[in-house]
Every structure is written in structure tokens, then in C-alpha cells.
Image (cartoon, helix red, strand yellow):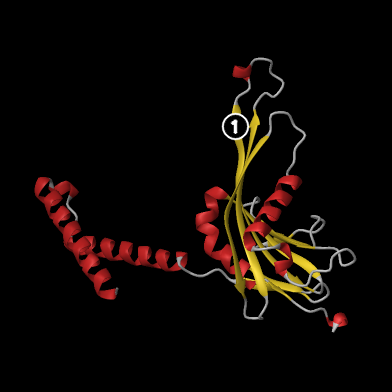
Amino acid sequence: MAMANAMIMAAAIDHCLLQSLLIYNQTKAFAVPRRKAMSLILSSYVVSEVGLALAQQSTVFREYIDAFDGYSFKYPGNWIQVRGAGADIFFRDPYVLDENLSVEISSPSSSRYQSVEDLGPPQEAGNKVLKQYLTEFMSTRLGVRRESNILSTSSRVADDGKLYYQVEVNIKSYANNNELAVMPQDRVVRLEWDRRYLSVLGVENNQLYELRLQTPENVFSEEENNLRQVMDSFRVNKIAALN
């Protein structure tokens, strides 16, 4: 890699020097001295290399541990906690407001889960997850339409020896710009939002735990690595009082 970069740099220098000499031959008023050209080229190369190194730096993660409810996960260090959001815990990106994570836990008095397999195979669990999302996003507005698709379902055994399901879905929301219009041509359908939803399901303490991640589809490719690290970090833990 270092040799390749050196060769690329050398080629770039030769090209720029050639351009400088051509400029000098055409008009001395715009000539660039060889030493100055070398300095500018080297400066640009160093700046570009530093920028690339900064861009490749990994995200710093923090760990959230809820010993009382029995779960833990890691999240990007710059995300902020939002209280009163309805979930057991809720964090969101401070810049991409539509990107967030939350944890939902089934009621301890009404659920007696022994394993995540109580939901059926991953595909069946995926259908249940999608149905729950669509129920929560149900709208009473006229002209609202939702399109949904299960992108993937899978299972894995984590380093704690427990089985987890992972579900990924895409949901799009469409709405008319003038839902009260009489003529169909006056009701133009537009895309309101297009989101990727990722869920991790686990069972412990006779309860079903669900880690939920939400992100706009148009930024998913940029955020995917971080989101998958959050998913892989999710663990459900035995509550001390139940030992």
C-alpha cells in the first residue's frame, strides 16, 4: 500500500511539474517556479492524507448497562439520551434526528418466555416485528399509504451463549399533498419518509427484549457499520433478584 501511494504521489508530482513548465513556456507572467510547485504539491498531498486518516477513524462507543431490567448495549458516544420517549431507554443521533435506538421489554406479569424461539423461526419473528411496526405507525390521515418489506431475518448465538434473532425491514410512507382535493389529479402522492428498521430480539427473565434501531434509508450505507456494532453488542442479562 505504501509503495502504491508513493508511486501515485510521484506520478502526480511529475504531472504537475509538467503543467508548470508548459505554463511557463506559454507566458512567463503565470509561470510557477519548480520549488514552489513542489511545495504546493507536497502540502496538498499531506493534507489529503491527514483528511483520509481522520475519516477512517473508528467511532467511539459507550456502554449502557441496565442492571435493574437486565440488558446492555453499546452506542455511538456522541448520541444523546432522550427521556420520556415512551421506551425503556432511548438514544438518538444529535445531527440526524431520525436516527435513534430504543429498547422495548415485554411485561413481566403477562409474558413467560423461555427462549426467543418461542416466537417461531426468524422469518416468523420478522413478520411479527413488521406487523408491530405498522401498527405503531398507523395513521388516521386521509391518503396515507405505507409500503413495507422484510429485508432479512437471521439468528445467532452470542458470546454469552444466548440465542438472538435479528430482523431488518424497510418502511416507506406516502401521503397526498392535498388529501381533501376532489379531483384525483389534485391529489399528488409524495414520499414522506423512507426508513430502515433493525431489531435484535432476546429472551431472559421470562421476558422478551427488543433493541430497535431506526435510520433514514439514504444514510444507512454510511451508518451501517456503526449500527451493526450496536446490534452485535446487545445482551440480555439475568436480573440478580431472580437468581
- Picture quarter containing residue 106? bottom right
Residue displayed at 59% across by 32% down: 190
| Image location of residue 70, percent across then percent down | 78, 74
Q: Looking at the rendering, in which quadrant would you find the C terminus?
A: bottom right
Label 1: which residue? 190
Residue displayed at 66% across by 73% down: 163
Q: Answer yes or no: is residue 236 visible.
A: yes
| Image location of residue 14, percent across then percent down | 16, 62
Position of residue 51 relative to residue 193, above or below, is below
Position of residue 129 relative to residue 2, above or below, is above
Position of residue 67 relative to residue 155, above or below, is below
Tell whether 193 sits left or right of 29: right
- Picture quarter containing residue 108? bottom right
| Image location of residue 31, percent across then percent down | 17, 52
Q: Is label 1 in a helix, a strand or a loop?
A: strand
Q: Nearer the viewer, residue 167 or 74?
A: 167
Q: Nearer the viewer, residue 192 or 202?
A: 202
Tell whether 109 sits left or right of 19: right
| Image location of residue 229, percent across then percent down | 58, 69
Check disc 1 and give the amino acid type.
Arg
Residue displayed at 17% across by 58% down: 15
Q: Residue furthest left?
A: 25
